[in-house]
Image: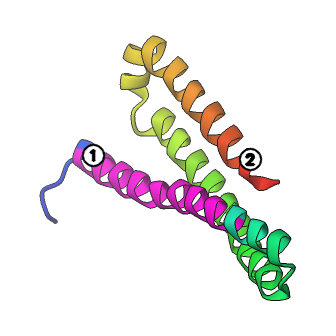
């Protein structure tokens, strides 16, 4: 094999998960701004093209939001499985920070929902 131990493999797996997850919140926040502009243009001009674009991108927004939630759950689950000793040692510090991150990210993205 490549001579990788369990710790290095866990680090690689977590790096992939975090790199994969960050795409979804970033795209969700960007799409929310774009959807707000499209809806504003539709309300101002009453041009049906903006409404159609809004409805098209809102479906992609919904799928992207769902993927962000799922990949975030996987990432949080890995703290308990791959990093259980670290979580036990630093849980009093990382626990509140993760709770804050989950709540703010979820409510920020859910606020863009509607």
Can you give x and y, in whole percent of width and height, for residue 37 in the image? 68, 66
* Residue beneath the point at 60% across and 46% down: 73
Report the side of 80 relative to 67 (left or right): left
The crowding category of the residue bearing disc 2, from other C-alpha atoms within 10 Å (few below 14, some 14 to 19, many at least 20), is few
Q: Is mark 1 on a helix, strand or loop?
A: helix
Highlighted magenta segment, given as a residue range: 8-35
Residue 15 in magenta stretch: yes
Vertically, is 15 above or below 30?
above
Q: Mark 2 points at which residue?
A: 110
Of residue 37 and residue 93, the one placed in the foreground of this image is 37
* Figure quadrant of residue 68: bottom right
Can you give x and y, in whole percent of width and height, for residue 48 in the image? 85, 86
Of residue 74 and residue 18, the one placed in the foreground of this image is 18
**Image quadrant in which the N terminus is located:** bottom left
**Image quadrant in which the C terminus is located:** bottom right
Mark count: 2
Q: Mark 1 points at which residue?
A: 6
The crowding category of the residue bearing disc 1, from other C-alpha atoms within 10 Å (few below 14, some 14 to 19, many at least 20), is few
* Residue beneath the point at 77% across and 81% down: 50
């Amino acid at each position: 094999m490549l001579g990788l131990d369990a710790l290095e493999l866990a680090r690689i797996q977590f790096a992939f998960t975090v790199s994969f997850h960050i795409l979804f919140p970033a795209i969700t926040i960007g799409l929310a701004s774009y959807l707000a502009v499209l809806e504003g243009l539709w309300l101002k001009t009453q041009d049906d093209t903006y409404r159609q674009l809004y409805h098209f991108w809102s479906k992609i927004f919904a799928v992207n939001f769902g993927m962000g939630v799922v990949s975030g759950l996987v990432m949080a689950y890995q703290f308990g499985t791959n990093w259980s000793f670290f979580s036990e040692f630093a849980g009093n510090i990382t626990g509140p920070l993760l709770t804050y991150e989950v709540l703010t990210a979820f409510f920020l993205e859910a606020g863009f929902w509607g």
